[in-house]
Amino acid sequence: MSLPQVVIVGRPNVGKSSLFNWLARRRLAIVDPTAGVTRDRMTHTLCERDRYFDVVDTGGIGIVDADDLSDHVESQIETAIHSADLVLFVVDAQSSVMPLDEEVARRLRPVSAPVILVANKVDHESIELHANEFFRLGYGQPLGTSTKQNRGRDELVRALVEQLPEETSDNVTELDEPIMKLAIVGRRNVGKSTFVNALAHDERMIVSEVPGTTRDSVDVRFDMDDKAFIAIDTPGLTRRKAIKTDLMFYSTHRAHRSVRRADVVLLFFDAAQPIAHTDKQIWSTILEEHKPCFFVVNKWDLYAGAVATEEWAQYLRDTFPSQSHVPIAFITAKTGKNVKTLVNHAQMLFRQARERIATATLNKIVRAALERNPPPLSSMHRLPKIYYATQVGVQPPTIVLVCNEPTAFGEPYRRYLLNALRDQLPFAEVPIKMLMRKRDSTPGEKKTADTVSIDD
């Protein structure tokens, strides 16, 4: 069975996203004074008092969206409310009862799930009496909290756990750990949210032609072949010089953070659009984090026939010339074509990145590479030597070559060694991090800790 859903609702700017982050003990949702920042449902799984449940953040009820997406936001809120096992109705204790608070109260009356009235922003005791005014909304005594002053969290958690559906032998849920986290990144309007909806088999994300519809990175749990996965939908990125507001800055920051915590990254391109400078900036971030990656050409149904897949693939290879190991997929997220195949292949990349190779195997490959093509004499008139190789890490696979002088190996030769490792090891499609480290000094030599890295 699915986990119980604890849904946070309220009018704009009462602190719903702050409460969501506070309960999760992590900065997941963007918090900004601008009304209407939250559009999509954001979900995070919590375990409190031995109970697992999902806490769900929603947009502000009654917001007039600047991009004319109010109906989409309302649809997301309605879906969340009707799937709720428990509702946290949030109000602002530092204001009086507003007409929109009364509207939220009215909309919750037909809901069968229990409702806890949460008076947020009770930053000090003098506000608690003022919060009693919200009793007239008809949901009992408000429970005072302050995310800013960290007041009332234990009381809120206790109250909501008590109101969760009772566990029975039939509905006890064992939470399966996700097999893999997929970050979906790319420019605006390349079909990232449509792809996530295809994975979830649900209108989980708002899909619109309006650029910047998705404002926050949203984790969406989905199942495929009886395995659990996390898809991380990210805001569409733009050129750095175009970032002019706090909201755009936070959106960009969250997208970059999503790349860091992903196991595999899917870099999306629109089949009908040329590769832009923004795509190269995104790729630079992926490269810095050494993440396994797919180049995903989306909306292929609109472009197929105009050009062969081989031509588009060559276009990508020419644009990213040193990344010939990165696999390429052609999909149509709207119809689901090739979506499952892409996820299955992404699992292969995930497994590659976690492989460990025996030291004896590594040394055999390195010795063969040295014999085929010995390193040239360095400018220091010293013969470069590699003593042994060992793998010291995974995700990315990290290999250390211990040598007499790291700087004696030029960039072309280090690249040759890296390619030799890729050809012979099960790392054909993932980044490899190779370090060349000087062997500990022998008696009479100057001690050094020189290390040269080459990242792929």
Image: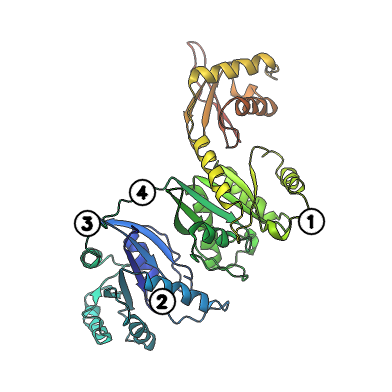
From the viewer's perspective, tell me whether residue 121 is left or right of residue 239: left
Q: Label 4 amino acid?
A: Asp
User: Callout 4: helix, strand or loop?
Assistant: loop
From the viewer's perspective, tell me whether residue 64 is left or right of residue 91: right
Q: CA distance from mark 4 to mark 2?
A: 35 Å
Residue at the location (70% across, 54% down)?
Answer: 277
The label nearer to you, 2 versus 3, is 3
Depicted 269 relative to depicted 452: above or below: below
Q: Label 2 amino acid?
A: Asn
Pinpoint residue 334: horizontal percent, then vertical percent: 60, 62
Q: CA distance from mark 4 to mark 3?
A: 18 Å
Do residues under tags 4 and 3 come within 8 Å of each other at their CB atoms? no
Q: CA distance from mark 2 to mark 3?
A: 29 Å
Query: The C terminus is located in which quarter?
Result: top right
Residue that label 2 marks = 13
Q: Identify the residue at the far right of this view.
A: 306
User: Callout 1: helix, strand or loop?
Assistant: loop
Depicted 215 relative to depicted 95: above or below: above
Residue at the location (61% across, 51% down)?
Answer: 338
Q: Label 1 amino acid?
A: Ala
Residue at the location (66% across, 13% down)?
Answer: 371
| Coloration of the structure image | rainbow
Pinpoint residue 269: horizontal percent, then vertical percent: 66, 55
Pinpoint residue 183: horizontal percent, then vertical percent: 52, 52
The label nearer to you, 1 versus 2, is 1
Q: CA distance from mark 1 to mark 4?
A: 44 Å
Pinpoint residue 381: horizontal percent, then vertical percent: 69, 15
The label nearer to you, 4 versus 2, is 4
Q: CA distance from mark 3 to mark 1?
A: 58 Å
